[in-house]
């Protein structure tokens, strides 16, 4: 009998056998899985190869050998694809589905490498979806990737964690904090780290993650320097100011208060100021609520700022906290 026909018959037999029972005998399942894996290796490019992989995911649960084989197979496909070789997307997709069915956290690395390999979006989404549903400590895996992986994979780990449906606010805050720390610690001007830094700042602002106060100050000074040297846009500087307002403490208030003092002095002497930056600083000082900013905010009313900035300064003063 033709070998391809044998493969198809075996696939149909094992699938029917699986669904005809309420459960599958462990020893039989292991033996069947190993037989199917052997057949797959002998016919890796046959029309039924994808079906064999999917079936392995169904009957191979708990079989460490099958789990490792599928993980290694996917990692190998990913490495080849990243090296410039063409990929059989149907096999990659089937392997991802099989790994998801197996549901073992040892597959995190294989799935994450597929997520980062540069596959078409639909394959990358399948890899991410499997990564996000397999039980295990995904949070710790992504933290480790942020610590140890190259820049492009740090960015991928950050995005995977921030967009995860299973990670809570605290876990996402920790990931964003570490992402900002890693980006600031790098001496190289790397586009992936820069993208991650700005995205982490937006996440920390949204979460009001106060543990990142010191990092937010460092980011503010770096962006301020880049803005003054026309390296980044004003929007980036305003985002850094907003982050200080959302996560900052008295140290952040001191930084912004000094900046408002400089703006007030320039306004007094030259009548010039940037409305957007000034408003952002005033609002952030109000968010922090540290009374050390009182004099700088009060002085705003004595200068010829527009009414909306004076109103924002009055509102910020009302939000200041005073020790009783």
Image: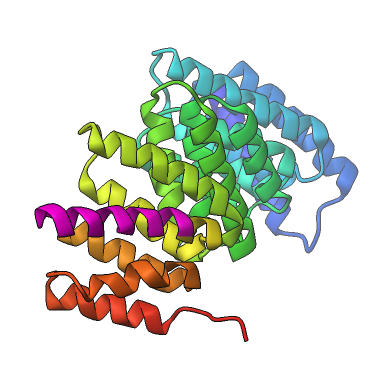
User: Does residue 110 lie above or below 179 as drawn?
Assistant: above
Where residue 235 appears, x then y in whole percent? 24, 50
Residue at 58%, 37% in the rendered image? 111
Give how far across and how far down residue 307 sits, in percent: 14, 78
The quadrant of the rendering that contains the C terminus is bottom right
Q: Main secondary structure of the magenta part?
A: helix
Which residue is farthest right?
Answer: 27
Q: Is residue 117 left or right of residue 182?
A: left
The answer, for residue 238, to whether it is visible in the render is yes
86 relative to 270 in the view: left or right: right
**Magenta stretch, residue numbers:** 254-273
Depth check: give the residue in front, 265 or 314.
265
Say which residue appears at 51% left-offset and 60% top-offset: 248
Q: Decide which of 257, 62 is in the foreground and name it.
A: 257
The answer to whether residue 115 of the structure is visible from this angle is no
Please state, as top left, top right, bottom left or bottom right, where the N terminus lies in the image. top right
**Relative to the observer, which residue lies in front, 50 or 79?**
79
Residue 223 location, quadrant = top left
Q: Is residue 260 magenta?
A: yes
Judged left or right of residue 285, residue 226 is left
Q: Position of residue 65 (x, y in %)?
A: 80, 30
- Return the x and y of residue 154 as percentages of the image width and height: 52, 34
Residue 293 inside the magenta-drawn segment: no
Q: Is residue 284 above or below residue 235?
A: below
Residue at x-position 59% and y-position 36%: 146
Q: Nearer the viewer, residue 280 or 103?
A: 280
Colour scheme of the picture = rainbow
């Amino acid at each position: 009998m033709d070998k391809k026909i044998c493969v198809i018959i075996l696939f149909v037999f094992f699938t029917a056998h699986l669904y005809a029972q309420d459960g599958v005998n462990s020893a039989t399942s292991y033996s069947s899985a190993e037989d199917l894996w052997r057949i797959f290796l002998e016919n890796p490019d046959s029309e039924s190869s994808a079906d064999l992989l999917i079936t392995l995911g169904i009957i191979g649960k708990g079989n460490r050998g099958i789990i490792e084989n599928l993980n290694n197979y996917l990692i190998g496909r990913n490495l080849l694809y990243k090296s410039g070789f063409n990929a059989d997307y149907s096999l990659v997709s089937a392997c991802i589905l099989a790994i998801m069915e197996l549901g073992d956290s040892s597959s995190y690395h294989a799935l994450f490498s597929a997520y980062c390999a540069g596959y078409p979006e639909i394959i990358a989404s399948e890899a991410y979806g499997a990564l996000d549903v397999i039980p295990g400590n995904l949070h710790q895996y992504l933290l480790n990737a942020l610590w140890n992986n190259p820049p492009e994979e740090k960015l991928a780990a950050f995005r995977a964690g921030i967009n995860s449906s299973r990670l809570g606010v605290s876990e996402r805050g920790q990931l964003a904090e570490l992402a900002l720390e890693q980006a600031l610690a790098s001496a190289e001007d790397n586009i992936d780290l820069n993208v991650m830094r700005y995205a982490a700042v937006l996440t920390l602002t949204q979460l009001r993650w106060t543990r990142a106060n010191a990092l937010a100050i460092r980011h503010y000074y770096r962006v301020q320097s880049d803005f003054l040297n026309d390296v980044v846009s004003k929007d980036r500087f305003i985002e850094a100011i907003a982050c200080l307002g959302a996560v900052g403490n008295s140290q952040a208030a001191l930084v912004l208060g000094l900046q408002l003092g400089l703006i007030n002095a320039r306004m007094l002497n030259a009548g010039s100021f940037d409305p957007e930056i000034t408003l952002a600083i005033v609002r952030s000082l109000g968010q922090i609520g540290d009374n050390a900013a009182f004099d700088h905010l009060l002085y705003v009313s004595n200068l010829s700022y527009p009414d909306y900035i004076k109103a924002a300064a009055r509102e910020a003063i009302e939000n200041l906290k005073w020790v009783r």
